[in-house]
Image (cartoon, rainbow, N blue to C red):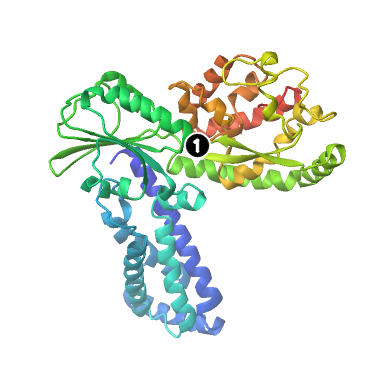
Amino acid sequence: MKINSFFKYVLRFSFLQFIISFSTIRYFDEFTFMNVEHKFNIYEKIIEDYERFYSFIPKSFITIDTIFVAITFIFLILLYSTKFYTYVNELDFSYKNKYLDDYVMLYLMWNSYFFSMLYIFRIDGLSRLYLILFTFIIPFLLLFFRNSEIISNFLGRSVSSENYISFNLESYSNFKNLRILAYRNEKLAIKTPNQNIKESVIEEVNNLNKIDNLNLVVLNISTLKRLPIELEEYLINLNKKVLIISSNELIFHNNFLYRFSKIDSKYIYYFNNDIQYGSKYILKRLLDITLSITLLVGFSPLIFLLFVYVRIVDGGPSIISQVRVGLHGRKFNMYKFRTMYTNAHNLRSELEDQNKKSGPLFKINQDPRIIKKLQFFRNYSLDEIPQLWNVLKGEMSLVGPRPLFEDDTSLFDRNYMRRLNVMPGMTGLLQINERDTDDFDIWYKYDIDYIENWTLYLDLKILLRTFKAVLNKSNAGK
């Protein structure tokens, strides 16, 4: 096992040890022990056993709490010695959602073990009703923290809401029962000759991603022993999940990490270059949730004042929503304080000759669409505050490329489509460097730089520098 993988195992094991031990101790103290005297009587029994069987352990270590910690530790050692709990193979066949099956299995394993330990350590006389309720809690915690997939579902990124596009995969193919496909939705199925696979994949993936959410690309190839090098590099740089089913063992031009399996005389290759997935996505979401709640509470007086001010100055709704394109092409309603007239976006075509931006951007000096006296709000990005709600919902992040309109997305080339493979943000590298630039190529440069160098540390650096950038009275992002 690699050091990195070993560290993740130890970290997850330690976290489970803490959360299960803590939950058990608190629950028993609050509910299952009848009273303090009852708990002391059990402690006396444990001391009797201590003097008979394990007196070599320092007596100060012998408490009911340490017994629960030891019980949990032994159970997790046994559990982690099995692949059932520690390894979820996306290339296994799965004919239905197995969460209920897994929960029942964990329920039986934990409770048969735990009640045996209660008997061995003579922990009896407990409240039976609360003990029955307790039997459901620990298996739920074990299932919830089993892997990043379930936690990601809870934080807003459900596997069942993800889509894939397939090439040459028959509708009756048994490979559609692979776990990685069974839990996702097939959005488009393409038939194309192997000799045209490069052009077809690049064109169809780009086209679909511009109009719909796309997370996985599936290729079924029969005659090729090598992918065209341009296609291979495209898939590697796509920042999505890629599954290749081949009749031949493939030889790749590039060195990259992938998983390999052989099923039914077919060679299966899978790699996931989604940079904000799994534990990385979870950590980013936890940071977003914590800071967005803090900022919403801190800004609540200002939100109220701005809400009232916009209504007084211009009337009508103070907060508007605009359809923007988010992670992997998913559409969502982005919220802003209204600083423009209601039909402002419809006036873009009439004002196109005054546009100072290049590419799929639109901004003009002295914009007549802005309501009188509200330029101040835009100068200090105060109109963006409602997007903290988008962050809390999981549609945006605090840091990432700015989400653009569908019309803008339709103009992206295949390289710039990569910006859809990270969560859109309220601020980013562009906003802290050249926020008011007229050059779309600079947008492209900063967005791609962010994608290729993304880390949580980079997000924190951008957040700290954003406050300084706002104070410079630069114009807010689009």
Q: Position of residue 30 (x, y in %)?
A: 56, 75
Q: Is residue 158 left or right of residue 397?
A: left
Say which quarter of the image contains residue 338.
Answer: top right
Q: Is residue 256 above or below residue 390?
A: above
Residue 150: x and y in percent read 42, 53
The three-letter amino acid code for the residue at tag 1 is Leu
In the rendered image, is residue 148 in sight? no
Task: Determine which residue is flagged by label 1.
Answer: 327
Relative to residue 8, is residue 475 drawn left or right?
right
Which x, y percent locates residue 321?
A: 66, 40
**Number of numbered discs visible in the structure rendering:** 1
Image quarter (top left, top right, bottom left or bottom right) of the N terminus: top left
- For the point 35% across and 80% down, the residue is 119
Q: Residue at x 36, y 60 (%)?
A: 99
Residue plotted at (51% across, 22% down): 411
Q: Is residue 362 visible?
A: yes
Q: In the rendered image of this protein, does residue 349 appear above or below residue 41?
A: above
Is residue 320 rendered to the left or right of residue 37? right
Residue nearest the viewer, comparing 56 with 405: 405
